[in-house]
Image (cartoon, rainbow, N blue to C red):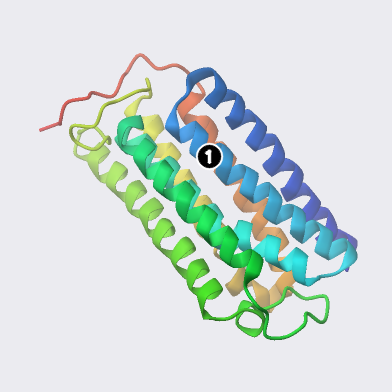
Amino acid sequence: MDRLTVSLAAFASVVALVFALVTADRWHRRRLAHHGAWTIAMALFFIGAGALWWATASGWSDGVFRVFFTAGAVLNVAWLALGTVALLAGNRVARPLRSTLALLSAFAIGVMVIAPTKSPIVGDEIPRARDHFGVLPRSLAAIGSGVPALVIILGALWSVARLLKGSSPAVAGARRDVSISANRLVLSNVLVALGTLVLSASGSLAGRLGEVRAFTVTLSVGVVILFVGFLVPGARRSTAVLDATPSP
C-alpha cells in the first residue's frame, strides 16, 4: 500500500482519538448527553479508522475487517445521531434512547463476533461485505447507518427551517440543559450532517481514487468536519439561551 494512503488512515485515527478525548472531557465536566454520545461515536471512529490504518500498513484479515465493519458501518452513525437528538431535544429525551442504543449496540457486537464468513479475505483492497458476511450483519450495517444518517440530516433541516422562521431550533417542549445560541446549535447540526455525508461518499470516489484511497480521503475530511461541528456548541458560553417553551 502506498505511503499516502497509510498516512491518511493514520491521520484519521489520531484525529479521531484527540476528538474523543476532547468530547470525553466536556462530558466529564458537564454531563450533557450530546457530549457523551459524541464521545462514543468518536471512540468508534477511532477504532474503525485504526483498523483501516492497520490494514493499509499490514494487510486485511478477517479480524481486522470485523472490527472495521462493526465500528464504522454498524455502530458509529447511530451514536452520531444520538448526539443530534440530544442537542435538539435535551438530556431528558436522549437518556432513555441512549440506554436502548447501548443494548442494540451490544447485540450488534455479539452478532459481528460470531457471524460466519462466506469466503476468506484476499488482497489489499477493502473487502466487500456482501462477499464476506451473510444477511444479518449486512442488514445491521444498512439499518445502523441508513436510519441514523436520515435522523442527522432531518435534524439539520429541522433546525435550519426553525431558525429561518425565527423559532427555537429545539423540539417544542423539550427541557433545555445547555446554554447554546440558536445559531450555534443550527451550525453544529449542519456540520455533523455534512460530515456524515462526506463519510458516505466513499463509494462515488472509489472509481477515481481507488477504494482504499477513497476511504482514507473521506475519513480524513469527514472527521475534521465532524469535530468542528462538535466544537461549535461549546466554543463560547452564549447568553442567548434556548427556551424550554414552544415557540409560536
Percent coordinates x, y for residue 34 in the rendering: 45, 35
176 with respect to 237 (left or right): left
- Viewer-closest of 136 and 192: 136
Q: Is residue 13 above or below residue 242?
A: below
Q: In the figure, residue 8 lies in which quadrant?
A: bottom right
- Compared to residue 185, the image places residue 142 above or below, namely below
* In the image: residue 243, left or right of residue 78: left
Percent x, y of residue 196: 51, 55
Residue 218 appears anywhere in the view: yes
Is there any visible trace of residue 2 in the rendered image? no
> Along the horizontal axis of the image, is 80 left or right of 69?
left
Residue at screen point 42% across, 38% down: 187
Q: Which residue is mark 1?
A: 38
Q: Quadrant of residue 204?
A: bottom right
Across and down, in percent, residue 233 comes to: 46, 29
The image shows residue 176, relative to residue 88, as above or below, that is above
Give the position of the C terminus as an image quadrant: top left
The residue nearer to you, when weighing 156 against 82, is 82
Q: Is residue 154 left or right of residue 72?
A: left
At 64% across and 59% down in the image, what residue appears?
218
Q: Quadrant of residue 112?
A: bottom right
| Residue drawn at 65 percent across, 84 percent down | 131
Helix or strand or loop: what does disc 1 sit on? helix
Q: Amino acid at mark 1?
A: Trp
Label 1 Cα crowd, 10 Å radius (few <14 / some 14-19 / many 20+) = many
